[in-house]
Structure formats: C-alpha cells, structure tokens
Image (cartoon, rainbow, N blue to C red):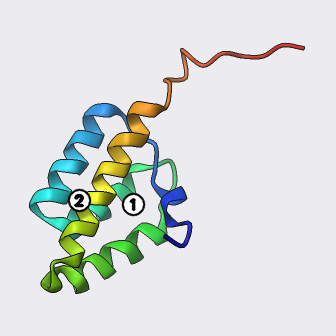
Amino acid sequence: MFGWEKSIPLVGKLFAFVIMLLCITSPPFGTVLMACAGSRFEIVQIKVAFFQGVLLFFFIGYIWSIWWGYLCLKKSFQSKPETEKTVKIE
C-alpha cells in the first residue's frame, strides 16, 4: 500500500505484542505508539493513524489497524537481534 509498510519500525517482540493489543482494542493509538517506538519519529505512521481514525466509523480503519499491528508483530519476529546477525568478512 503505497510503500508505507517500509516505515513500520523494528521493535522488540514484547513491545510488538503491546502494539498489536492496542491496535485491536483502540485502533489509532496503537499506530501512534508505533510511530514513536522506532529509532526515529515516523510522520508516515501518524498519517496512517489519522486515516485509520477517520475510517474507523466505516470499519475499514479497524481492519487496517489490526493489519498494521500484525505487520509490526511479523517484522519483529522475522528480524534477528543484533547479536545473532552474521558478519560477512571478505
């Protein structure tokens, strides 16, 4: 979706579960927390949260928020911690 998924920050697994829970229980707030969670503030995430809030009344925002939380959770489980990353020496 417009390449916005690239702005989802990499967070720890426990924090990703908290974000997912917030995305399910209070849709725009989970995405706002996600915007503040990364190494830098993501304005794209704030825009996504705004659109989720506007579309919440049409049920589209709710589904979008759950999907966004799932993507954050998925990203946290797919990445390896810094200590496990291999360094290629040539």
Task: Residue 85: name its quadrant.
Answer: top right
Q: Which mark is residue 66?
A: 2
Q: Secondary structure at mark 2?
A: helix
Residue at image x 24%, y 50%?
Answer: 19
From the top left corner, tell me how far across and down residue 41 is, in percent: 47, 61
From the top left corner, tell me how far across and down residue 51 is, in percent: 32, 81
From the top left corner, tell me how far across and down residue 84 is, in percent: 54, 15
* Residue 84 sits above or below residue 18 on the image: above
Residue at image x 28%, y 68%?
Answer: 64
Could you tell me the amino acid type at mark 2? Answer: Ile
Q: Secondary structure at mark 1?
A: helix
From the top left corner, tell me how far across and down residue 57 is, in percent: 13, 85
Q: Quadrant of the C terminus?
A: top right
Q: Quickly name the residue at label 1.
A: 35
Task: Residue 27: name its quadrant.
Answer: bottom left
Please indicate whether residue 11 sits to the left or right of residue 56 in the image: right
* Residue 20 sits above or below residue 90 on the image: below
Camera-side residue of 45 and 41? 45
* Residue 89 sits above or below residue 3 on the image: above
